[in-house]
Amino acid sequence: EVQLVESGGGLVKPGGSLRLSCAASGFAFRSYSMNWVRQAPGKGLEWVSSISGSSSYKFYADSVEGRFTISRDNANNSLYLQMNSLRAEDTAVYYCARAHHSLGEYWGQGTLVTVSS
Amino acid sequence: QSVLTQPPSVSAAPGQKVTISCSGSGSNMGNNYISWYQQLPGAAPKLLIYDNNKRPSGIPDRFSGSKSGTSATLGITGLQTGDEADYYCGTWDSSLSANVFGTGTKVTVL
């Protein structure tokens, strides 16, 4: 069974940093590209970042380019999102998702990030 | 700001059919496959349709997808109260080198 479990969310002050993790199981993690998608309270889905299976390719939304860094550890079946210079508008539930014929074939349950003073 | 446009809401009575449109441009929907996602209240999104019209295992055939040019449509037949959710289209935008989502459509079962 494919499982994706996010962690690392919480309350952080503007300008602060946070690192999100996504623990994957039930599939050959290294064989799949992975995505981070976020959803601000009461808003729609917003793609944040993608990484290929070998980490050769990384893509970012303009809204996070230069502040967020996506990475993965295939030996430990883990996906990460390092978030720096956080802003109030980064407040959202962050989902990790496995890509296959789509951005999100499987999704985690999400982790809430709140940026507030 | 979403580059794919969907109607904010659609509604119909139980057993009826609804369709949700998704409109984009040549750089996204014109050149790439479309996916559709269902997000039930308080839950994570779930893949409904991929590659324009294919259903993952476990998705009932009440859900269907189609694409023509720079527009796509999600159809739901035999509407059930459990179908009340937000629905999003998504695809890759070759000009932006970014994944993009639609604005989302809320389905209400009357």
Image (tube, rainbow, N blue to C red):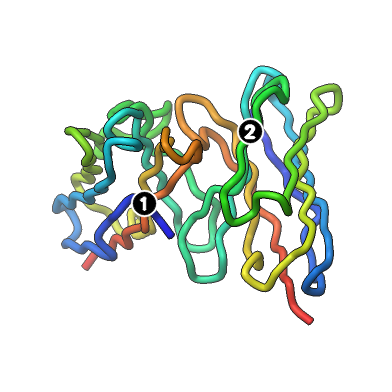
The three-letter amino acid code for the residue at tag 1 is: Val
Q: Splitting the image into 4 quarters, where does residue A41 fall?
A: bottom right
Q: Are marks 2 and 1 on the same chain?
A: no
**Quadrant, the C terminus of chain A:** bottom right
Q: Could you tell me which chain the residue with mark 1 belongs to?
A: B
The residue sitting at 40% across, 38% down in the picture is B91
Front residue (pair B4, A110): B4
Q: Nearer the viewer, residue A91 or A69?
A: A69
Where residue B89 appears, as percent x and y from the top left, is: 36, 45
The relative height of residue B22 versus residue B94 in the rendered view (above or below) is: below
Residue under label 2, please give it: A34
Q: Quick one: label 2, few (<14), some, or many (20+) residues within 10 Å?
A: many
> Which residue type carries mark 2?
Met
The alpha-carbon separation of the residues under discs 2 and 1 comes to 22 Å
Q: Residue at x 44, y 45 (%)?
A: B100
Q: Does residue A38 sit above or below A117 in this rendering?
A: above
Q: Is residue A116 left or right of residue A107?
A: right
Q: Residue furthest left?
A: B16
- Residue tagged by mark 1? B3
Residue A86 location, quadrant: bottom right
Q: Position of residue A16 (x, y in %)?
A: 83, 66
Relative placement, left or right, of B20 versus A61 is left
Percent from the top left, x then y, of residue A89?
62, 69
Q: Secondary structure at mark 1?
A: loop
Q: Residue at x 65, y 68 (%)?
A: A91
Query: Horizontal placement of B22 versus A12: left or right?
Result: left
Tally of marks: 2
Say what secondary structure mark 2 lies in.
Answer: strand
In this view, the mark in front (2 or 1): 1
Q: Is residue A34 left or right of residue B83?
A: right
